[in-house]
Amino acid sequence: MLHDKMSKALNEQMNWELYSSYIYLAMSAHFEQVNLRGFAHWMRVQTMEEITHFKRFYDFLTARGGRVVLSQIKAPPSEWKSPLDAFEDVLKHEQEVTRRIHHLADLAVELKDHATGSLLKWFIDEQVEEEASTDEIIQNLKLNQDAPSGLYLIDKELAARAFTVPPDISV
Ligand code: FEO
């Protein structure tokens, strides 16, 4: 049985994962508007990944007898000055997610909640990857954003991102 404090904290994190999904969907719509279809596709995949993060917490909370309380999702911005501006926002956002995940991990230690600690281990590793892949795109954009052919190549590269539902996540 989950401690009430942890149940509440996991519900807040679920809201944050849905908000993440919402931000990336807004970025995808923005990139569609400026005809960067590969960037738009990458953001759509990111949106789907965030929904699986939400589901991972939701399934865990349900399995551990916690109470799921869905709350309002705040509206994301709707435009960005450039692809670099958008990806810098992605990195800032993911750094905030990391901070929140680490805070949850601290709470799991405080409550001696080993099961939640084990779940959070997956997220801690995931955040390392999320920040690294975003930073790689930022560096690439910094090198190429002023050359239209460079942006075209990055767009092509981002269009190749694949998404599959992880086998341990129920639809
Ligand atoms: Fe669910 Fe991108 O962190």
Image (tube, rainbow, N blue to C red):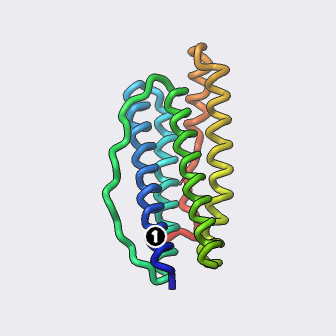
Which residue is found at the position 57% from the left and 64% from the top?
A: 104
The percent position of residue 110, horizontal first and vertical second, equals 62, 73
The percent position of residue 15, horizontal first and vertical second, equals 41, 59
- In the displayed structure, 50 sits above or below 11; it is above
Which residue is found at the position 51% from the left and 27% from the top?
A: 85
- In the displayed structure, 59 sits above or below 92; it is below
Given the current orientation, which residue lies at the most extreme bottom position?
Answer: 1
- The verdict on label 1 being within 8 Å of ligand 1 is no
Nearest the eye: 4 or 140? 4
Given the current orientation, which residue lies at the most extreme top position?
Answer: 147
User: Left or right: 88 with respect to 51?
Assistant: right
- In the displayed structure, 93 sits above or below 104; it is above
The percent position of residue 80, horizontal first and vertical second, equals 43, 28
Nearest the eye: 162 or 10? 10
Q: Residues within 10 Å of mark 1 (few under 14, many from 20)?
A: many
Residue type at mark 1 is Tyr
**Quarter location, residue 132:** top right
Residue 130 can be seen in this image: yes
Which residue is found at the position 60% from the left and 28% from the top?
A: 154
Residue 171 can be seen in this image: no
Nearest the eye: 148 or 95? 95
User: Left or right: 115 with respect to 59?
Assistant: right
The percent position of residue 58, horizontal first and vertical second, equals 46, 70
Given the current orientation, which residue lies at the most extreme front position?
Answer: 110
Of the 4 image quadrants, the one containing the C terminus is bottom left
Residue beneath disc 1? 58
For the image, the number of numbered tags is: 1
**Quarter location, residue 66:** bottom left
Label 1 secondary element: helix
